[in-house]
Amino acid sequence: MRFEDDLPKGVIPATLLAMQPDGSVDWTDTRRHLSSVAGTDGIEAITVNGHASEVHACTLSEQLELLDAAGEIAGDRIPIISGIYADNSAEASRIARSAANAGAGALLVFPPAPLAIGGQLRPDAIRAHVASIADACDLPLILFVYPASSGLQPKLDDLVRLVEAVPPIRAIKDWCNDPVLHARHVRALQTLPRPVNVLTTHSAWLLPSLVTGCAGLLSGSGSVIADLHVALWRAVQLGDLVAARSVADQIAPLAEEFYRPPLVDMHNRMKEALVSLGRMERAVVRAPLVKLPAEEIAHISAAVDAAGIAREGALEPAA
């Protein structure tokens, strides 16, 4: 299934990947998680094979199996976005073709890590990488824009030229981490003759981000609080600031816990939150990520309580 007019928009949770104690994929728990998130009223799509599902540590076979599982569970109702994470452009194109053949409705394109050492000064390099992915399939692309500190953030003028040069780019996942630049992205991209939607992933300051006029949000914390993201999105769209502030206040304890330093553990923390809530059996991550210390896990559980999210009973068998 694809987005209307191929324009990704609205609330799009990025899902997690459940693991067995030995680090292999727990497909039963993963399918349960996918079903839970995809069943949230008001979301527009879900994302697999992103940072949240530890795509950096997954084989292509595992990525395609995850995409297949998501498609079986929800692909007839909502689009499934699949991440394209590769440092080699030829490999990225091969993954894109495979994801398209497996039923993805859009692709989330990660910037290749080799460009972190000055790649923002060679916009032709990122353009060639993205163009090769676009040539490999006919799917709409979501370009992942990283913070300036990563060395992978294109200058705004270069970003505009890039989306104009590669028409399949229909949205960006904006992680520029700069409120002023983020607002400029919204104004510049969403008003182009061929609009490119801005999907925020500034989940640590989501309410201020959304009121800039973003076309949606694509966030790993949606794996835990998709319903609250929908409630916040709807309140902002209605211009109901009182309701929006109320939802943002409820989200705050978990956002503060998920996104505090070191950020490398943000999705690790989300798994622990799901365990605390009774939605995932165990919180196992693949190396080089490591298990959180007991004290931090306790803080996450306390944040779940502070957010007022009801815990669930014993896990039911996955569908």
Image (tube, grey):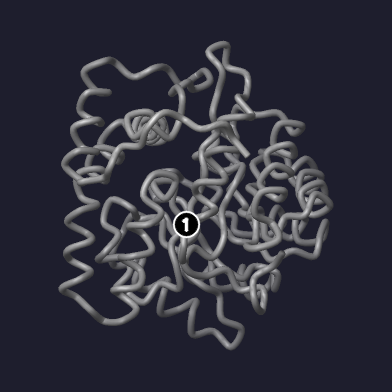
Q: Position of residue 109 (x, y in %)?
A: 62, 52
Q: Classify mark 1: helix, strand or loop.
A: loop
Q: Quadrant of residue 291?
A: top left
Residue behind mark 1: 40
Q: Position of residue 198 (x, y in %)?
A: 47, 69
Q: Please state the total of marks drawn on the protein image.
A: 1
Location of the C terminus (image quadrant): top right
Q: From what the image shows, is residue 145 above or below residue 215?
A: above
Location of the N terminus (image quadrant): bottom right
Seen as rendered, the residue at the extreme bottom is 193
Q: Is residue 77 left or right of residue 218?
A: right
At horizontal 46% and vertical 51% (from top left) the residue drawn is 146
Seen as rendered, the residue at the extreme top is 22
Query: Disc 1 residue type?
Result: Thr
At horizontal 64% and vertical 67% (from top left) the residue drawn is 169
* Front-lying residue, 207 or 197: 207
Q: Position of residue 8 (x, y in %)?
A: 57, 68
